[in-house]
Amino acid sequence: MERLEDRIRRLIVETLNLEDISAQDIDEEEPLFGEGLGLDSIDALEIGIEIQKTFGVKIDSKDEDLASHFSSVKALARFVARQQQGQVHEPG
Amino acid sequence: MTENLWHFLSTAAPDASVATDGTRVATAGSVRAAALSVAARLGAGEGPVMLYCGDAANFVAGLAGALIAEREVLLPGHAAPDYLREIGVANGAFVSDIRGADAIQVSVYETGPGPGIFPSSLEGRVGFFTSGSSGEPKLCMKAMDQLAAEVAVLRRQWGAPQGAVAGTVSHQHIYGLLFRVLWPLATGAIIFSQQLETWEAVAARLEPGGVIVSSPAHLARIPSAVRLPHMPTAIFSSGGPLSLDAAENAAAQFGFTPIEVLGSTETGGVAWRRQTGANMPWTPMPEVEIRADETGALVVRSPFTGHDGFLSMGDAVEIADDGRFTLRGRLDRIVKIEGKRVSLPRVEEALKSLAGIADAAAIDLPARQGALGAVVVPTEEGETALATIGPFRFSRHLRSLLKSRLEPMEQPRFWRFVPRIPENAQGKRIAADLRALFSSPELPQIDTSEIDGDDARFELRLQPELRWFEGHFPGQPILPGVAQLHIAAVLAEQTWGTVFDGREMSRIKFKRVMQPEERVSLTLRKDRSRLDFKYICDGDVVASGTVRSSS
């Protein structure tokens, strides 16, 4: 089974069609936006859509911690894992 | 006016010099005799005559001959066989000095003066093949009257050349034809008939008082060791924009700031300038009327256009009170990126203003949903950054620097770092060539390879931009079986030089799919005409088989 962090790194590279960089080249702790990987707000939109599609999780645009969920691969993995767990316990 | 073009040739003494190729002299008598010979062999046939000559003196005889025969003349831009087929040379008469070509041969240096009357005036039409920015040849017809009117203006503006006229550009295009051939021909100056490819050759051939007809492609690449034996009376540049750097460098090295001529095949010459400083405005040529149309584009009316109205140049223009003008970028280089209008020159200006970038081109990429691409030549400083943080992070760093100047859609999404921006022979950037830099790769990224006799092993990364993943399948991309065979065969061919075309295959097994970003090792074993391949992922064989070469 692929680690969630690895799946997310792959998702970022595939979704954004990133060239000249492979999934392994993205450090799990490295900031995704600004200095670091250098992704921008449009990239964030696309990653958000793909994360919801792939993992069946919901992203609440009013969530005040949204920026921190997207800050790194590790943070995203944590966010996805928590959301998925939350859904298992939800009735229906 | 047309009479002027041919007056010298038709009236000069038979032994008067018209041209030289450096060792031999073409006299008026031999050019006239060669022209009459071409005319006789062409006869009054139907349809246009294609004319291609490597030597400008042969070209003059071919052109005059075709016009004497009252045939329309088309000038192919070059003589590559596929290109000649594309523009239809096979369908009509072909006049050429290419030895062995299936053509009516013309050779002035091997023709002596002969009998026959050379007309004092020649009318007719000449067609040029221009390369539009899409790169496809486009035909543009000119009457000899228009060309003669333009030569009259060259004469008015710059007089007659005082020495031989030598050129680094081809006379098969309008600029080379006017400046290298018709202007000296009309004024009785000597035509240096070979196109000079290098500055060393120019230096070896330049005569006192000589004129050099060159292009931005050549002027931007003057070897630092080249010195001219004499100061030329003029150096011309046309066909594309000459950078200020190149103009200043030519001035420093040759003692003459090139005269840059603005024009196009359709409009003919429009204006000229000498870049002795930044932002030098253009001065319209005599008889040329310029104006800005309602979209701000430069429009031109002159006796050279063959058109009563104004023709658009496609450049944004700013006209000063004294009639001189400044260009503000191509208007047709505005593209739609995700529905928003983006000016490519504006993006290029912003890119070039960054510290790590020496030169840049921006291009829209229809094959990538119309995204914006940047082709960048890094400075030395940029090279260092590129090597340190890698192309992706460097491109994103550059993109973040553009944020303060450009809107999101104007910021390039895909980047290519190159030693120089591709240009065609006329120094023009062709959209198709720029886009080709972004076409998707067919081969996976090779991390390591070991070759041991007939055995080879490659560690591969299946990067997502591989062409094979496109549309196969949407949302669930996998590497198709045919691609696995193709990759194995191409790597085998690169390793051993044997072509395995896969017409015969056996024991092909695809055990599980391979996805983007997977790392796989590919082992190849060659046994004469047989190639065994195996893709291994995490210790499991995921695909294997045998293909044979056709030999």
Image (cartoon, rainbow, N blue to C red):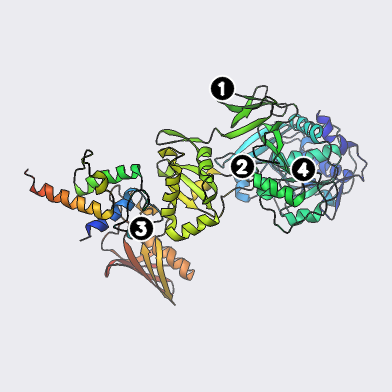
| For discs 1 and 4, the disc positioned in front in the rendered view | 1
- The residue at which mark 3 appears reads as A22
The amino acid marked with disc number 4 is Arg
Label disc, if present, on residue B119 of the rendered structure = none
Q: Is residue B312 in sight in this rendering?
A: no
| Left or right: B224, with A8 as reference point | right
Q: Circle 3 — which element?
A: loop
N-terminal-most mark, 1 or 4: 4
Q: Are marks 4 and 2 on the same chain?
A: yes
Find the distance from the CA under tag 3 to the CA under tag 1: 49 Å
Q: Are marks 1 and 2 in contact (CB under 8 Å)?
A: no
Residue B218, position in %: x, y?
A: 68, 50
Q: Nearer the viewer, residue B56 or B501?
A: B56
Secondary structure under badge 1? loop
Residue underneath mark 2: B87
Measuring from the top left, give residue B438's x and y in whole percent: 46, 49
Q: Which mark is residue B180?
A: 4
Residue B294 numbered tag: 1
User: The residue under label 1 is which amino acid type?
Assistant: Glu
Q: Residues within 10 Å of mark 1 (few under 14, many from 20)?
A: few
Q: Chain of mark 3?
A: A
- Quadrant the N terminus of chain B occupies: top right
